[in-house]
Amino acid sequence: MSEATLDPEDNKIIFLARSARARNGAAEGAAVRDETGRTYSSTNVDLPSLTLSALQVAVAMAVSSGARSLEAAALVTAGDGPSEADTRAVRDLGGETLLVAAPDGTLRRS
């Protein structure tokens, strides 16, 4: 699936994830879209006392803002892709669409 064939809202969350990653110079950027269409973008957190993936942060942001479900999630990384914990966090809120893109926005997996 190319960027041209993606839903515009899915392109949007990839763009938001890329932007968050670039802005913070982070290893990962993520964005999720909840059941009302609200989006949440984040980067990974790597502190001595707290380590979270970008997807875990985005899901936590959505939940703490009152989201009850996710329509879609996107991860932008140069790494291998989402961990099992990332996938479970998205699925916990019913998310079926998990897009994985390279830092340049090239879709690697949907």
Image (spheres, rainbow, N blue to C red):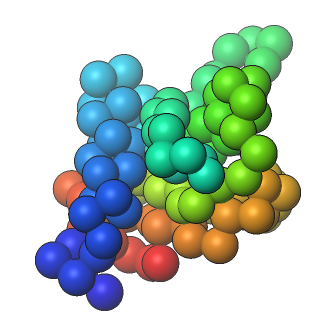
- Residue 52 located left or right of residue 58: right
Q: Nearer the viewer, residue 62 or 78?
A: 62
Query: Going by the picture, which residue comes out furthest to the front?
Result: 36
The residue positioned 31% from the left and 86% from the top of the image is 1
- Residue 105 located left or right of residue 38: left
- Residue 66 located left or right of residue 9: right
Quadrant in which residue 95 is drawn:
bottom right
The residue positioned 36% from the left and 31% from the top of the image is 20
Q: Where's residue 88, x and y in %?
A: 81, 60
Q: Can residue 98 be seen in this view?
A: yes
Q: In this view, does 39 lie above or below 65?
A: below
Q: Where's residue 62, x and y in %?
A: 66, 34
The residue positioned 72% from the left and 52% from the top of the image is 69
Q: Where's residue 99, x and y in %?
A: 47, 67
Q: Nearer the viewer, residue 57 or 12?
A: 12
Q: Which of 101 and 15 is in front in this view?
A: 15
Q: Can residue 25 be seen in this view?
A: no
Q: Where's residue 79, x and y in %?
A: 49, 58
How many labels sit on residues? 0
Query: Going by the picture, which residue comes out furthest to the bottom?
Result: 1
Q: Is residue 52 above or below residue 10?
A: above
Quadrant in which residue 72 is drawn:
bottom right
- Residue 10 located left or right of residue 50: left
